[in-house]
Image (cartoon, rainbow, N blue to C red):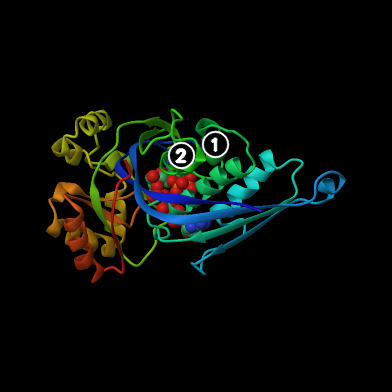
Amino acid sequence: MQRIQIKACAKINLSLDVLRRLENRYHEVEMVMQQILLHDDVAVRWFAGEHGQNAQKEKVEIELSTNRPYLPRDERNLAYKAAMVMTDRYGGGRSGKIRIDIKKRIPVAAGLAGGSSNGAAVIHALNYLWQLGLGVKELCEVGSELGSDVPFSIMGQAKENTELGLAGDPLATHCAVARGTGTDLEPVIGLKSHLVLTKPPMGVSTAEVYQGLEIGKIERHPNTRELVTALAKKNYKIIQKNMINVLENFTLTRYPNVMYTKNKVERLFDEEAVLMSGSGPTIFALCRNRSEAQRACEELKTYNKETFWTRTTY
Ligand SMILES: C[C@@](CO)(OP(=O)(O)O)[C@H](O)COP(=O)(O)OP(=O)(O)OC[C@H]1O[C@@H](n2ccc(N)nc2=O)[C@H](O)[C@@H]1O
Ligand SMILES: Nc1ncnc2c1ncn2[C@@H]1O[C@H](COP(=O)(O)OP(=O)(O)O)[C@@H](O)[C@H]1O
Protein backbone atom coordinates (compact mmCIF):
# COMPACT_ATOMS: atom_id res chain seq x y z
CA MET A 1 0.00 0.00 0.00
CA GLN A 2 1.24 3.49 -0.84
CA ARG A 3 -0.11 6.64 0.78
CA ILE A 4 0.17 10.41 0.41
CA GLN A 5 -1.50 13.20 2.37
CA ILE A 6 -2.18 16.49 0.65
CA LYS A 7 -2.87 19.92 2.10
CA ALA A 8 -5.98 20.89 0.12
CA CYS A 9 -6.00 24.66 0.60
CA ALA A 10 -8.96 26.99 0.17
CA LYS A 11 -8.94 30.11 -2.02
CA ILE A 12 -10.32 33.61 -1.84
CA ASN A 13 -11.10 35.89 -4.76
CA LEU A 14 -9.26 39.19 -4.30
CA SER A 15 -11.38 40.49 -7.19
CA LEU A 16 -14.11 38.99 -9.34
CA ASP A 17 -15.45 40.52 -12.53
CA VAL A 18 -18.04 39.02 -14.87
CA LEU A 19 -17.66 40.18 -18.47
CA ARG A 20 -20.50 38.41 -20.28
CA ARG A 21 -22.89 35.49 -20.32
CA LEU A 22 -21.78 32.67 -22.64
CA GLU A 23 -24.02 30.48 -24.78
CA ASN A 24 -23.44 27.43 -22.56
CA ARG A 25 -24.93 29.35 -19.60
CA TYR A 26 -21.48 29.83 -18.10
CA HIS A 27 -19.98 33.31 -17.72
CA GLU A 28 -16.75 34.86 -18.90
CA VAL A 29 -14.91 36.09 -15.82
CA GLU A 30 -11.74 37.95 -14.92
CA MET A 31 -10.65 37.42 -11.34
CA VAL A 32 -7.62 37.32 -9.09
CA MET A 33 -7.52 34.09 -7.09
CA GLN A 34 -5.33 33.73 -4.01
CA GLN A 35 -4.63 30.52 -2.12
CA ILE A 36 -4.97 30.60 1.68
CA LEU A 37 -3.59 28.35 4.40
CA LEU A 38 -6.98 27.15 5.71
CA HIS A 39 -7.07 23.59 4.36
CA ASP A 40 -8.61 20.14 4.39
CA ASP A 41 -6.33 17.11 4.80
CA VAL A 42 -6.83 14.68 1.95
CA ALA A 43 -5.13 11.30 2.44
CA VAL A 44 -5.08 8.96 -0.55
CA ARG A 45 -4.04 5.30 -0.36
CA TRP A 46 -3.47 2.99 -3.33
CA PHE A 47 -3.82 -0.72 -2.72
CA ALA A 48 -2.48 -2.37 -5.84
CA GLY A 49 -4.40 -5.52 -6.85
CA GLU A 50 -3.27 -8.41 -8.95
CA HIS A 51 -1.45 -7.76 -12.20
CA GLY A 52 -1.35 -9.74 -15.41
CA GLN A 53 -4.35 -11.69 -16.65
CA ASN A 54 -6.52 -11.02 -13.57
CA ALA A 55 -6.06 -7.29 -13.97
CA GLN A 56 -8.29 -7.47 -17.05
CA LYS A 57 -11.18 -8.78 -14.98
CA GLU A 58 -10.70 -6.59 -11.95
CA LYS A 59 -11.04 -2.88 -11.95
CA VAL A 60 -10.25 0.11 -9.80
CA GLU A 61 -12.47 0.39 -6.74
CA ILE A 62 -12.93 3.76 -5.01
CA GLU A 63 -13.78 4.25 -1.33
CA LEU A 64 -14.22 7.60 0.45
CA SER A 65 -14.68 8.74 4.03
CA THR A 66 -15.06 12.22 5.49
CA ASN A 67 -15.64 13.83 8.89
CA ARG A 68 -18.68 15.68 7.45
CA PRO A 69 -21.42 13.02 7.46
CA TYR A 70 -23.76 15.14 5.32
CA LEU A 71 -21.37 15.12 2.34
CA PRO A 72 -21.90 12.49 -0.35
CA ARG A 73 -19.36 9.64 -0.45
CA ASP A 74 -20.03 8.60 -4.04
CA GLU A 75 -19.52 10.21 -7.47
CA ARG A 76 -21.33 13.37 -6.25
CA ASN A 77 -18.27 14.08 -4.12
CA LEU A 78 -15.67 15.98 -6.17
CA ALA A 79 -12.84 13.92 -4.65
CA TYR A 80 -14.52 10.66 -5.67
CA LYS A 81 -15.28 12.10 -9.11
CA ALA A 82 -11.63 13.11 -9.50
CA ALA A 83 -10.60 9.51 -8.80
CA MET A 84 -13.08 8.32 -11.46
CA VAL A 85 -11.77 10.78 -14.06
CA MET A 86 -8.15 9.82 -13.31
CA THR A 87 -9.03 6.12 -13.53
CA ASP A 88 -10.80 6.62 -16.87
CA ARG A 89 -7.80 8.46 -18.28
CA TYR A 90 -4.84 6.73 -16.65
CA GLY A 91 -6.16 3.63 -14.88
CA GLY A 92 -5.91 1.34 -17.93
CA GLY A 93 -4.22 -1.95 -16.96
CA ARG A 94 -4.40 -1.18 -13.24
CA SER A 95 -6.45 -3.01 -10.67
CA GLY A 96 -6.77 -2.20 -7.01
CA LYS A 97 -8.42 0.17 -4.59
CA ILE A 98 -8.19 3.94 -4.12
CA ARG A 99 -9.03 4.88 -0.54
CA ILE A 100 -9.68 8.61 0.09
CA ASP A 101 -9.99 10.05 3.62
CA ILE A 102 -10.95 13.72 3.88
CA LYS A 103 -10.60 15.70 7.08
CA LYS A 104 -12.56 18.84 6.33
CA ARG A 105 -12.00 22.23 7.91
CA ILE A 106 -12.99 24.43 4.97
CA PRO A 107 -16.69 25.36 5.26
CA VAL A 108 -18.92 23.78 2.59
CA ALA A 109 -20.68 25.80 -0.16
CA ALA A 110 -18.89 28.86 1.15
CA GLY A 111 -17.21 30.45 -1.90
CA LEU A 112 -13.85 29.02 -0.77
CA ALA A 113 -13.55 26.16 -3.30
CA GLY A 114 -13.43 23.49 -0.59
CA GLY A 115 -14.89 20.77 -2.80
CA SER A 116 -12.67 21.79 -5.73
CA SER A 117 -9.58 21.62 -3.52
CA ASN A 118 -10.48 18.04 -2.54
CA GLY A 119 -10.85 17.08 -6.21
CA ALA A 120 -7.54 18.73 -7.04
CA ALA A 121 -5.82 16.86 -4.19
CA VAL A 122 -6.95 13.48 -5.52
CA ILE A 123 -5.69 14.35 -9.01
CA HIS A 124 -2.27 15.26 -7.55
CA ALA A 125 -2.26 12.17 -5.33
CA LEU A 126 -2.90 9.71 -8.16
CA ASN A 127 -0.35 11.42 -10.40
CA TYR A 128 2.14 10.84 -7.56
CA LEU A 129 1.10 7.34 -6.47
CA TRP A 130 0.80 6.01 -10.03
CA GLN A 131 4.03 7.81 -11.01
CA LEU A 132 2.38 9.31 -14.08
CA GLY A 133 4.88 12.17 -14.29
CA LEU A 134 2.27 14.69 -15.45
CA GLY A 135 3.03 18.42 -15.16
CA VAL A 136 0.71 21.07 -13.70
CA LYS A 137 -0.64 22.01 -17.16
CA GLU A 138 -1.79 18.44 -17.87
CA LEU A 139 -3.23 18.06 -14.36
CA CYS A 140 -5.18 21.32 -14.80
CA GLU A 141 -6.64 19.98 -18.03
CA VAL A 142 -7.95 16.93 -16.13
CA GLY A 143 -9.21 19.23 -13.35
CA SER A 144 -11.19 21.45 -15.70
CA GLU A 145 -13.45 18.44 -16.33
CA LEU A 146 -14.54 18.63 -12.69
CA GLY A 147 -15.21 22.34 -12.18
CA SER A 148 -14.08 25.88 -12.90
CA ASP A 149 -12.18 26.31 -9.61
CA VAL A 150 -10.29 22.99 -9.79
CA PRO A 151 -7.35 24.07 -12.04
CA PHE A 152 -6.43 26.94 -9.70
CA SER A 153 -6.52 24.54 -6.75
CA ILE A 154 -4.13 22.26 -8.65
CA MET A 155 -1.70 25.14 -9.28
CA GLY A 156 -1.81 26.25 -5.65
CA GLN A 157 -1.38 22.76 -4.23
CA ALA A 158 1.61 22.16 -6.51
CA LYS A 159 3.32 25.12 -4.81
CA GLU A 160 2.26 24.32 -1.24
CA ASN A 161 2.80 20.52 -1.23
CA THR A 162 6.50 20.43 -2.08
CA GLU A 163 6.69 16.63 -1.66
CA LEU A 164 4.78 16.34 -4.97
CA GLY A 165 7.93 17.57 -6.73
CA LEU A 166 6.02 20.16 -8.77
CA ALA A 167 6.75 23.38 -6.84
CA GLY A 168 9.19 24.45 -9.58
CA ASP A 169 6.67 23.92 -12.40
CA PRO A 170 6.06 27.23 -14.26
CA LEU A 171 2.33 26.96 -13.47
CA ALA A 172 2.74 26.26 -9.73
CA THR A 173 1.59 29.44 -7.98
CA HIS A 174 -0.12 30.85 -4.90
CA CYS A 175 -1.98 33.49 -6.90
CA ALA A 176 -3.29 33.77 -10.47
CA VAL A 177 -5.48 35.82 -12.76
CA ALA A 178 -8.29 33.60 -14.03
CA ARG A 179 -10.00 34.32 -17.33
CA GLY A 180 -12.46 32.52 -19.61
CA THR A 181 -14.75 30.49 -17.35
CA GLY A 182 -12.04 30.61 -14.65
CA THR A 183 -9.80 27.88 -16.03
CA ASP A 184 -7.52 30.04 -18.18
CA LEU A 185 -4.89 30.90 -15.57
CA GLU A 186 -1.90 33.21 -15.46
CA PRO A 187 0.38 33.02 -12.39
CA VAL A 188 1.01 36.40 -10.74
CA ILE A 189 2.70 37.66 -7.59
CA GLY A 190 0.31 37.14 -4.70
CA LEU A 191 -0.69 38.86 -1.51
CA LYS A 192 1.09 38.38 1.80
CA SER A 193 -1.53 39.00 4.47
CA HIS A 194 -3.17 37.66 7.61
CA LEU A 195 -6.92 37.19 7.30
CA VAL A 196 -10.12 36.61 9.16
CA LEU A 197 -12.93 34.69 7.43
CA THR A 198 -16.49 34.35 8.63
CA LYS A 199 -19.36 32.38 7.15
CA PRO A 200 -23.01 32.82 8.11
CA PRO A 201 -24.74 29.47 8.83
CA MET A 202 -26.04 28.84 5.29
CA GLY A 203 -24.69 27.75 1.92
CA VAL A 204 -24.96 29.60 -1.38
CA SER A 205 -25.47 27.98 -4.78
CA THR A 206 -22.88 29.27 -7.25
CA ALA A 207 -25.24 28.56 -10.16
CA GLU A 208 -28.04 30.60 -8.57
CA VAL A 209 -25.77 33.61 -8.05
CA TYR A 210 -24.42 33.58 -11.63
CA GLN A 211 -27.92 33.13 -13.05
CA GLY A 212 -29.33 35.92 -10.88
CA LEU A 213 -26.63 38.42 -11.83
CA GLU A 214 -27.72 41.31 -14.07
CA ILE A 215 -24.49 42.16 -15.86
CA GLY A 216 -25.81 45.44 -17.30
CA LYS A 217 -26.53 46.73 -13.81
CA ILE A 218 -23.08 46.19 -12.30
CA GLU A 219 -22.00 49.53 -10.83
CA ARG A 220 -18.31 49.02 -9.99
CA HIS A 221 -15.83 46.76 -11.76
CA PRO A 222 -12.35 45.94 -10.46
CA ASN A 223 -9.37 47.02 -12.56
CA THR A 224 -7.56 43.68 -12.83
CA ARG A 225 -4.41 45.08 -14.41
CA GLU A 226 -4.10 47.74 -11.71
CA LEU A 227 -4.64 45.10 -9.03
CA VAL A 228 -1.95 42.81 -10.46
CA THR A 229 0.56 45.70 -10.60
CA ALA A 230 -0.35 46.74 -7.05
CA LEU A 231 0.20 43.16 -5.83
CA ALA A 232 3.67 43.13 -7.37
CA LYS A 233 4.47 46.51 -5.77
CA LYS A 234 2.78 45.60 -2.46
CA ASN A 235 0.72 48.79 -2.72
CA TYR A 236 -2.02 47.93 -0.23
CA LYS A 237 -4.05 51.08 -0.90
CA ILE A 238 -4.45 50.21 -4.59
CA ILE A 239 -4.95 46.52 -3.78
CA GLN A 240 -7.84 47.41 -1.47
CA LYS A 241 -9.31 49.87 -3.97
CA ASN A 242 -9.64 46.98 -6.45
CA MET A 243 -10.99 44.41 -4.02
CA ILE A 244 -14.35 44.32 -5.82
CA ASN A 245 -16.53 41.26 -6.38
CA VAL A 246 -19.41 41.87 -8.79
CA LEU A 247 -21.30 38.84 -7.41
CA GLU A 248 -21.42 40.41 -3.96
CA ASN A 249 -24.40 42.67 -4.51
CA PHE A 250 -26.66 39.80 -5.58
CA THR A 251 -25.76 37.57 -2.59
CA LEU A 252 -25.93 40.45 -0.06
CA THR A 253 -29.35 41.52 -1.31
CA ARG A 254 -30.74 37.99 -1.58
CA TYR A 255 -29.43 36.87 1.85
CA PRO A 256 -29.78 39.53 4.61
CA ASN A 257 -27.70 37.29 6.85
CA VAL A 258 -24.68 37.85 4.61
CA MET A 259 -25.29 41.62 4.52
CA TYR A 260 -25.45 41.61 8.33
CA THR A 261 -22.15 39.72 8.53
CA LYS A 262 -20.45 42.05 6.05
CA ASN A 263 -21.58 45.11 8.02
CA LYS A 264 -20.27 43.56 11.24
CA VAL A 265 -16.84 42.88 9.69
CA GLU A 266 -16.69 46.36 8.14
CA ARG A 267 -17.21 47.88 11.56
CA LEU A 268 -14.05 46.11 12.74
CA PHE A 269 -11.92 47.01 9.71
CA ASP A 270 -11.31 49.59 7.03
CA GLU A 271 -14.29 49.05 4.71
CA GLU A 272 -12.09 48.60 1.64
CA ALA A 273 -10.27 45.60 3.15
CA VAL A 274 -13.49 43.56 3.49
CA LEU A 275 -14.96 41.43 0.71
CA MET A 276 -17.16 38.43 -0.03
CA SER A 277 -15.28 35.49 -1.55
CA GLY A 278 -16.58 33.94 -4.80
CA SER A 279 -20.35 33.52 -4.86
CA GLY A 280 -20.38 33.70 -1.06
CA PRO A 281 -21.43 33.66 1.65
CA THR A 282 -17.96 33.84 3.31
CA ILE A 283 -16.75 37.36 4.11
CA PHE A 284 -13.03 37.93 4.59
CA ALA A 285 -10.95 40.86 5.81
CA LEU A 286 -7.25 41.60 5.40
CA CYS A 287 -5.56 42.02 8.78
CA ARG A 288 -2.35 43.86 9.68
CA ASN A 289 -0.95 40.98 11.73
CA ARG A 290 -1.79 37.66 13.34
CA SER A 291 -3.00 39.11 16.63
CA GLU A 292 -5.44 41.43 14.84
CA ALA A 293 -6.79 38.42 12.91
CA GLN A 294 -7.08 36.38 16.14
CA ARG A 295 -8.89 39.18 17.97
CA ALA A 296 -11.35 39.70 15.13
CA CYS A 297 -11.89 35.94 14.99
CA GLU A 298 -12.85 35.80 18.68
CA GLU A 299 -15.29 38.66 18.23
CA LEU A 300 -16.92 37.33 15.04
CA LYS A 301 -17.22 33.77 16.41
CA THR A 302 -20.02 34.99 18.67
CA TYR A 303 -22.08 35.66 15.51
CA ASN A 304 -20.89 32.90 13.17
CA LYS A 305 -19.51 29.61 14.45
CA GLU A 306 -17.61 29.08 11.19
CA THR A 307 -15.08 31.87 11.70
CA PHE A 308 -11.35 31.36 11.16
CA TRP A 309 -8.09 33.28 11.27
CA THR A 310 -5.53 32.29 8.71
CA ARG A 311 -3.12 33.79 6.19
CA THR A 312 -2.52 33.70 2.49
CA THR A 313 0.06 31.19 1.25
CA TYR A 314 3.24 32.66 -0.18
C1 LIG B 1 -17.71 31.86 -8.22
C2 LIG B 1 -16.42 31.11 -8.20
C3 LIG B 1 -15.25 32.12 -8.17
O1 LIG B 1 -14.01 31.51 -7.96
O2 LIG B 1 -16.19 30.29 -7.08
P1 LIG B 1 -17.12 29.73 -5.85
O3 LIG B 1 -17.97 30.79 -5.28
O4 LIG B 1 -17.93 28.61 -6.41
O5 LIG B 1 -16.12 29.24 -4.84
C4 LIG B 1 -16.25 30.23 -9.50
O6 LIG B 1 -16.40 31.01 -10.66
C5 LIG B 1 -17.20 29.07 -9.55
O7 LIG B 1 -16.46 27.92 -9.68
P2 LIG B 1 -17.09 26.44 -9.42
O8 LIG B 1 -17.81 26.42 -8.12
O9 LIG B 1 -15.97 25.47 -9.62
O10 LIG B 1 -18.15 26.36 -10.56
P3 LIG B 1 -18.63 25.14 -11.48
O11 LIG B 1 -18.83 23.94 -10.62
O12 LIG B 1 -17.74 25.03 -12.66
O13 LIG B 1 -20.03 25.69 -11.97
C6 LIG B 1 -21.16 25.80 -11.14
C7 LIG B 1 -22.16 26.67 -11.83
O14 LIG B 1 -21.76 28.05 -11.75
C8 LIG B 1 -22.04 28.74 -12.95
N1 LIG B 1 -20.80 29.29 -13.52
C9 LIG B 1 -19.58 28.84 -13.10
C10 LIG B 1 -18.43 29.39 -13.61
C11 LIG B 1 -18.53 30.40 -14.59
N2 LIG B 1 -17.45 30.95 -15.12
N3 LIG B 1 -19.74 30.82 -15.01
C12 LIG B 1 -20.88 30.29 -14.47
O15 LIG B 1 -21.98 30.71 -14.84
C13 LIG B 1 -22.73 27.76 -13.88
O16 LIG B 1 -24.11 27.93 -13.70
C14 LIG B 1 -22.32 26.40 -13.32
O17 LIG B 1 -23.29 25.43 -13.56
N1 LIG C 1 -15.35 17.06 -1.15
C1 LIG C 1 -16.31 17.96 -1.05
N2 LIG C 1 -16.25 18.94 -0.12
C2 LIG C 1 -17.21 19.89 -0.04
N3 LIG C 1 -18.30 19.92 -0.83
C3 LIG C 1 -18.41 19.01 -1.78
C4 LIG C 1 -17.43 17.99 -1.94
N4 LIG C 1 -17.81 17.25 -2.97
C5 LIG C 1 -18.96 17.72 -3.44
N5 LIG C 1 -19.35 18.78 -2.72
C6 LIG C 1 -20.58 19.56 -2.99
O1 LIG C 1 -20.19 20.73 -3.70
C7 LIG C 1 -20.98 21.85 -3.33
C8 LIG C 1 -20.11 23.11 -3.24
O2 LIG C 1 -19.09 22.85 -2.37
P1 LIG C 1 -17.82 23.79 -2.12
O3 LIG C 1 -16.74 23.45 -3.03
O4 LIG C 1 -17.53 23.67 -0.67
O5 LIG C 1 -18.41 25.22 -2.41
P2 LIG C 1 -17.82 26.52 -3.11
O6 LIG C 1 -17.59 26.19 -4.55
O7 LIG C 1 -18.89 27.55 -2.92
O8 LIG C 1 -16.59 26.90 -2.39
C9 LIG C 1 -21.66 21.48 -2.00
O9 LIG C 1 -23.03 21.59 -2.18
C10 LIG C 1 -21.25 20.05 -1.71
O10 LIG C 1 -22.34 19.22 -1.40
**Viewer-proximal residue, 2 or 25?**
2
- Give the distance between the C-alpha atoms of the residues marked 1 and 2, in whole angstroms: 10 Å
Q: Amino acid at mark 1?
A: Leu
Q: Amino acid at mark 2?
A: Ala
Q: Mark 1 Cα within 10 Å, few/some/many (few <14, many 20+)?
A: some
Tell me which residue sits at (59%, 33%) in the image: 133
- Secondary structure under the numbered disc 2 in the rendered image: helix
Visible in this render: residue 16? yes
- Marks 1/2 in contact by CB < 8 Å: the verdict is yes
Q: In this picture, is 72 found above or below 234?
A: below
Q: Position of residue 178 (x, y in %)?
A: 39, 35
The residue singled out by tag 2 in the image is 158
Q: Earlier in the sequence, mark 1 or mark 2?
A: 1
The C terminus lies in quadrant: top left
Q: In this picture, is 273 found above or below 22?
A: below
- Secondary structure under the numbered disc 1 in the rendered image: helix
Q: Nearer the viewer, mark 1 or mark 2?
A: 2
Q: Position of residue 311 (x, y in %)?
A: 28, 50
Q: Position of residue 276 (x, y in %)?
A: 28, 51
Tell me which residue sits at (54%, 32%) in the image: 135
For the residue with label 1, is its CB less than 8 Å from the closest atom of ligand 1? Answer: no
Does 142 sit left or right of 248 as displayed?
A: right
Q: Can you name the residue that lies furthest to the right here?
A: 53
Residue 139 - label: 1
Residue 41 - label: none
Residue 43 appears in which quarter of the rendering? bottom right
Residue 267 appears in which quarter of the rendering? bottom left
